[in-house]
Image (cartoon, grey):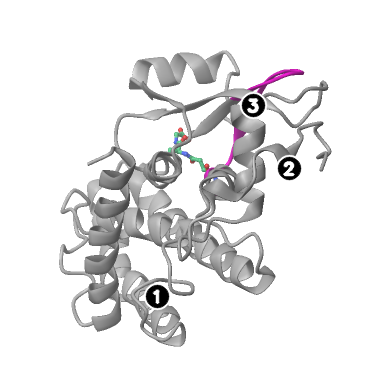
Amino acid sequence: MRDSNGSDSSLFPLIFIRENRGLTPVLAWTFTSLTFPAKEPGMNTFTSLRLRYLEFPGRAQAIRDTLQIGHIDFVDEHLSYDQFRDCRATGEFPFGGIPVLVIETSAGKQCVAQSNAILRFAGRLAGLYPVDDLLQALKVDEALGVGEDINGLLGPSLHEPDTERKMAMRKVLAEETLPFWMDCLERLLVANGGTGFIVGNHLTIADLKLYWIIDWLTMGILDGIPKNLTDGFKNVVDWRRNITAVREARLTETAGG
Ligand SMILES: N[C@@H](CCC(=O)N[C@@H](CS)C(=O)NCC(=O)O)C(=O)O
């Protein structure tokens, strides 16, 4: 069978498909494209990936985890703030923000932005995005959107230079806005049957995205946002515990541990 990019996927059959891991024939096809360059030139082949972000987890960690769990080779570039500012000033980032993914293709280099788009791409490669189930994919996308809504809500107070105004914003976030979103998450988990995952019975990029956002919110590094933000949301607490364990297990498995 010849793919649109010229790879012969029938030569590399379903050895990558593992039950209950969400890996699909599409993943096998993707590995084929990654591992074995197309015999004919094609726009869809790529030879290397470089993720550019700062050193901390932020919007990059779910992408890093996903690529690692999926055994996808990538360069994990950690920029200093000075490097970030310099690169942005020279127009290296399409929309000024990070993360960005630099993809070397047979047709040249592309730099792509927007964390959710990059995460979906990584998820497809890694088998952590339900490519064969439109409805589940829609639910994953919904959760990624929730993640960016929450990130967006923090933005104004992060950039507020006046401490009094900042703390007033944080009070509203801590007492009203974030509890509202924790309740939304609680309801998502209940609606999914309390499986310990945001969508279906398996780890997806939706879990990793929201996991790292909640981690950030409850680390105690955001003045005025309490570490116990998720207390009282039983399903959220159980889900975090589950994702901590599942993520750790999948990463250990990847590392051959
Ligand atoms: N919608 C973008 C937002 C990107 C974004 O704002 N990234 C932050 C870092 S998490 C950034 O670049 N901040 C620096 C700035 O905008 O000055 C995405 O999801 O990737």
Tell me the amino acid under the disc marked 2: Ser
Image quadrant where residue 237 sits: bottom left
Q: Quadrant of the C terminus?
A: top left
Above or below, 251 against 78 in this view is: below
C-alpha gap between disc 1 and disc 3: 41 Å
In the displayed structure image, the side of residue 36 where residue 239 appears, left or right: left
Residue at mark 3? 36
Foreground: disc 3 or disc 2: 2
In-front residue for pair 7/60: 7
**Does residue 231 lie above or below 76 as drawn?**
below
Query: SS for tag 2?
Result: helix
The residue wearing badge 2 is 10
Cα distance between the residues tagged 3 and 2:
12 Å
The disc, 3 or 2, on the residue closer to the chain's N-terminal end is 2
Q: Residue 29's spot in the image, x, y percent? A: 67, 43
- What kind of element bears circle 3? loop
Q: Are marks 2 and 1 in contact (CB under 8 Å)?
A: no
Q: Kindly identify the residue that appears in the image at 47 percent across and 54 percent down.
A: 152
Residue 256 is a magenta residue: no
Q: Name which of mark 2 and mark 1 comes first in the sequence.
A: 2
| Amino acid type shown at disc 3 | Phe
Task: Give the residue type that dot 1 points to.
Answer: Leu
Can residue 233 be seen in this snapshot?
Answer: no
Q: Position of residue 57 (x, y in %)?
A: 32, 41
Of label 1 and label 3, which has the lower sequence position? 3
Pinpoint residue 234: horizontal percent, then vertical percent: 24, 82
- The residue that mark 1 highlights is 185
Magenta range is 103-117
Give the residue displayed 24% in from the left and 75% down from the top: 238
Please tell me whether residue 111 belongs to the stretch shown in magenta: yes
Residue 165: which quarter of the image? bottom left
241 or 4, which is in the foreground? Answer: 4
